[in-house]
Image: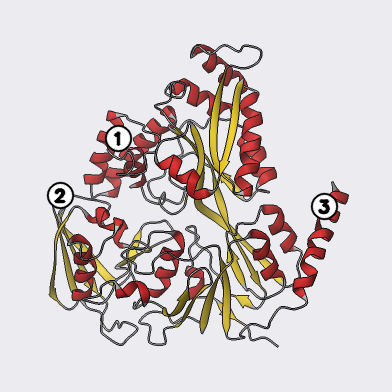
Amino acid sequence: MHNRTCWAGLLFCLALFPLLSCSPQPDPNTLVMIIDSSPTNLDPRVGIDAQSERIDNLIFDDLLSRGEDLNVAPGLAESWEIPDPRTYVFHLHRGVKFHDGRPLTSRDVKWTFDSLLQAKIRSTKAAVYKFVDRIEAPDDVTVIFHMKEQDATLLWNLSDGAIGIVPDGSGEEMTRHPIGSGPFRFVSAETDREVVVERNEDYWGERANLARVRFAVVPEATTQALELRKGSADIVINAMFPPDTTITLQRERNLVIERGTGTRLAYLGFNVRDPILKDARVRQAIAYALDRQPMIDYLWHGQAQRARSVLPPQSWAYDGNVPAYDHDLDKANQLLDAAGYPAVNGVRFHLTMKTSTDENTRLMVAVIQQQMRDAGIALDIRSFEFATFFSDVQHGAFQMYGLRWIGGNEDPDIFEYAFDSAKFPPNGANRGYYSNPKLDALIDKARREIDPQVRKPLYAEVQRILAEDVPSINLWYLDNVLVHTRRVRNLKLNPAGNYDFLRTAEMESRN
């Protein structure tokens, strides 16, 4: 094993050598951060992909922010009150300005949401605010949301990454030249190449230390690692390259690896309409057949934590007191026998699992295939380019699939979006067509409750039901892994794995 590792490292270095010798010197005043794809739309009312939301969060301010416990905290609104369950009153910071010098007032907040609710801007985000009846701006620093009915998720959907505030009257031009009030202002963008932002010198909050950030689009994993090694890039978070590459980069004298627990959840989804998988005993048996710890130890090199819920442990609503499905082949076999699937020549039945072509995913499903074989389940694997794979998942054309929740699972609103029977695609992400009237009623009741102390036990029961029914298997939460050059310091990771560390980051000048 030692010799094989040495040869692999030598070959990797030899492959990089021609490129290391001719790299241009980057701008000493610009931090270069690698991202794997371009943001689709930097209008914060429209963009829903990870890159759009994370870069938007630096350009725009949200009405509220999110704390370490993933609960809401002050943002543009320094305080708020809820005089009754259908009324929310927000009090804005004074003296906030947009990047073009215009003052930010309650009229801008009202326009941001009215442009969605009145369909002046086409966006799927409008559905998130369907329970908002009207918004008032009685003075420059007061905003009042009047609700059609109680909706405890409103505060979360006004916080970090949900939707940034745009200037009053902003239309589709915001896509081409976004103007916010955040710590960085937009400079330029070129699809599939880069996005450039620079420090907002007049920021109302704590001013950023970095003068300029260039988000360089580098979609290929090996090239990402190469750019870091040769110093033409400064930083990448949760890169596409496998954990083995992270370990190799850790040996580089000029690079530093930062790790922290994260909220990204890897999971396996079931089509519960399938003749075999509609039986909960079969799904439970598969959960018992999987041995997750070796995959965490050897595939992820310990850079993940076992998951018992869709919610991450950092969430105020998390409840880990549910069936854990520790590896137990005897229980798996007993459940499959009881479900009426005896082994014939060692095989009980065949299943097909669809995945993307991502290298980490392909390694994972190869192990899952072997572990399920030990329980008499023959698993066929079908890998597709991501767009094709995800389209099949959205249309229910699968028996099993593997995906990740990134950000969307940080609030208990995920239970409605992913498991409520009213949220089959295209209305939501209940892609496995799971239906449980008791669960639906609990979710609806919890959504209408404002008091977290009342909501928490309701969500605990929701998590217990899901753990017993197993419409999906929660595998692990991936750690946040930040690779950066030594000239970058004062980086503060948060569980969400967003780009907020750029707010505090500092950069030494190049010699």
Residue visible at 57% across and 46% down in the picture: 305
Question: On screen, 40 above or below 171?
Answer: above
- Within the image, what quadrant is residue 120 found in? bottom left
As drawn, the label of residue 200 is: none
Q: Give the x, y percent position of residue 147.
A: 15, 55
Residue visible at 64% across and 70% down in the picture: 484
Amino acid type shown at disc 2:
Glu
As drawn, the label of residue 5 is: 3
The quarter of the picture where the C terminus appears is bottom right
Question: On screen, 286 above or below 301?
Answer: above
Measured Cα–Cα span from mark 3 to mark 2: 60 Å
Horizontal placement of 381 versus 417: left or right? right
Q: Are marks 3 and 2 in contact (CB under 8 Å)?
A: no
Amino acid type shown at disc 1:
Ser
Q: Nearer the viewer, mark 1 or mark 2?
A: 1
**From this viewpoint, is residue 310 visible?**
no
Which residue was labeled with disc 1? 421
Which residue was labeled with disc 2? 149
Secondary element at image label 2: loop
- Within the image, what quadrant is residue 44 found in? bottom left
